Amino acid sequence: MTPEAIVELPDPFRFEDGTRVCTAAQWSRRRKEILDLIVEIEYGGLPPVPQETRWEELHTCQVRHMSGVRFISYRVVTGTDRPFSFLLNLLVPPGTGPFSVVLTGDACWKYVTDAVAGEVLRRGHILAQFNRVELAHDVYSSERASGLYLAYPDGCYGALSAWAWGYHRAVDALVKMDFVDVSRIAVVGHSRGGKTTLLAGATDERIALTCANDSGAGGAGCYRCQGPQSERLEGLIQTFPFWFGPRLREYVGREKDLPFDQHFLKALVAPRALLTTEAIGDVWANPTGTRQTHLAAKEVYRLLGAEGRIGLWFREGTHNHGESDWKAFLDFMDWQLCGREPACGFDMNPFPEMSPAFSWSAPGMSGGDSQTHP
Ligand code: GCU
């Protein structure tokens, strides 16, 4: 598909019956429609919510090289008839809390260096980590014979859904811990881990802030608006079929028929805080398309009076989850959840020549239905 072949991004304010959202109050009904549509078609649904989630404390100690910091290791156990468990490790800052939380499922990737962990703790947040590949291996297996697929064999949810489910169960546990501030839980992940956090944040309103780093296709990128070297749906589905639900492949070569694009996923997070962190040289992850989904989702934030809650941040360089990405996320979190003004802006536009790929806009607050972009 060439960029010239691209049609306009779908209008998130258009109900399935063809009518259009007119007021902020009507958004929750449209949000539900979008949720059902995108979770089902793109990700194959989500595994069921278990009857219960509990945890066992395995170990606690003081961290020798971090004064006053405690390490606590838990096993999160879900369900009764089909139990499933995974590890959740916390670094807790000095004091009694309640503390805000930075939760990441990317423990498999070791992007959280001691310097990053130290910075999270210095800012007064708990750092909570789990390894999402405990829930579903990041390796294709047509048998679906490991992890969560054994506990919940029904359905056709892909690995991104299984990983997002891990975030939800970690949140189940965190919100019951008396040293956690349940209103300030943020999730952050990189690349396929960023696709996961976007899905997790879109589908769980207990998550106050969602951050996706370099998440690209199936994450903050755009299927319809592609840069010259960005990842297309066809290649994504060929290489990683198990990340998604089976229906997504029906749209290979006919992306313009998808009843959504990734601004719909971002819009599901609204009005909660959402940050996309990107690298200009990470062309595979489609930085221009990500700017398009940002602009389009921002219209939903505008309707809800929360325009300042959606952020987009860029750096030079390529695919990585490095210290500057973490710093941008933590500055955004400190601003959005703790009221500390950031030093930089979070509506970066490295592509000033690019026009928005949509002509619709947020309906007027008083019931108007303006159709053009300002
Ligand atoms: C591949 C894949 C991307 C993914 C990335 C990653 O490059 O094509 O979609 O984001 O891996 O997870 O590192």
Image (cartoon, rainbow, N blue to C red):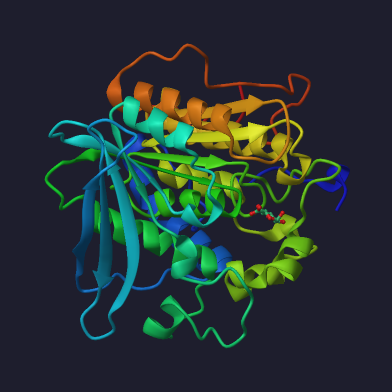
- Give above or below for 245 relative to 95: below
- Give above or below for 56 relative to 349: below
Q: Residue at x 34, y 73 (%)?
A: 48
Q: Residue at x 52, y 60 (%)?
A: 38
Q: Quadrant of residue 247?
A: bottom right
- Give above or below for 302 relative to 201: above
Q: Is residue 72 visible?
A: yes
Ligand 1 shows up in the quarter that is bottom right
Q: Which residue is situated farthest in the front direction here?
A: 64
Q: Residue at x 42, y 76 (%)?
A: 148
Q: Quadrant of residue 324?
A: top right
Query: In the image, residue 107 lies at what x, y percent?
Result: 47, 54
Q: Residue at x 53, y 83 (%)?
A: 144
- Give above or below for 23 relative to 40: above
Q: Quadrant of residue 277?
A: top right
Query: In the image, residue 167 lies at what x, y percent?
Result: 37, 56
> Across the whole image, how many numbered discs are drawn on residues?
0
Closer to the camera in the image, 364 or 283: 283
Query: In the image, residue 264 lies at what x, y percent?
Result: 53, 48
Quadrant in the picture for the C terminus? top right
Closer to the camera in the image, 61 or 199: 61
On screen, residue 97 versus residue 195, left or right, reads left
Query: In the image, residue 358 lies at what x, y percent?
Result: 67, 36
Q: Is residue 359 visible?
A: no
